[in-house]
Image (cartoon, rainbow, N blue to C red):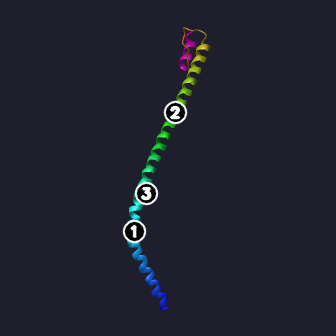
Amino acid sequence: MREQQIEKWLVGAALAFAASTLLPVVKNTLLPVAEAGYQGLRSAAGAARSSLQRTREELEDIVAEAQFERMKKKLDLEIASSGNEFEPALCGSEAGEATFER
C-alpha cells in the first residue's frame, strides 16, 4: 500500500516537472497557430459579411425594379382607360368631383 502511494507521488512529481518544462514549448508552438486561426476566422467572417451585403443590395434592386414595373403597368392601364391622351386620368376624390362638374 505504501509503495503504491510512493509510486503515485513519483508519477505526479514527474508529470509536474514535465508539464513545467513542456508548457513554454507548447505555448510557443500553439500561440502562432491560434493567432493564424483567429485571423483566418476574421477574414472568413469579413468575406461572409460582404457577400451577404452584396446579396442584400441585389435583392433590393430586384424589388425596386419590380415595384417600378408594377407602377408603370398601372399608369399605362390608367392612360389606356382614360381614352383621351391629353386629359390626365383622375383618381380618387378628383374623379368624383369631375363627374359632378360635367
- Determine the CA span between mark 2 and mark 3: 37 Å
Return the disc, 1 or 3, that comes first in the chain's sequence. 1
In the picture, the disc for residue 58 is 2
Is 25 left or right of 87, judged from the image as shown?
A: left
Label 1 crowding class (10 Å Cα cut-off): few <14, some 14-19, many 20+? few
Residue placed most toward the observer, 90 or 98: 90
Q: Which callout, 2 or 3, points to the residue nearer the camera? A: 3
Q: State which quadrant residue 26 falls in.
A: bottom left
**Badge 1 amino acid:** Leu
- Give the magenta part as a residue range: 92-102
Q: Position of residue 102 (x, y in %)?
A: 57, 9
The kind of secondary structure element at disc 3 is: helix
**Badge 2 amino acid:** Glu
Q: Residue at x 61, y 10 (%)?
A: 83
Is residue 39 placed above or below 52 in the rendered structure? below
Q: Residue at x 45, y 50 (%)?
A: 40
Residue sitting farthest toward the bottom: 2
The answer to whether marks 1 and 3 mark residues whose Cβ atoms lie closer than 8 Å is: no
The kind of secondary structure element at disc 1 is: helix
Residue marked by disc 1: 23
Is residue 96 placed above or below 10 in the rendered structure? above
- Determine the CA span between mark 2 and mark 1: 51 Å
**Badge 3 amino acid:** Val
In the picture, the disc for residue 33 is 3
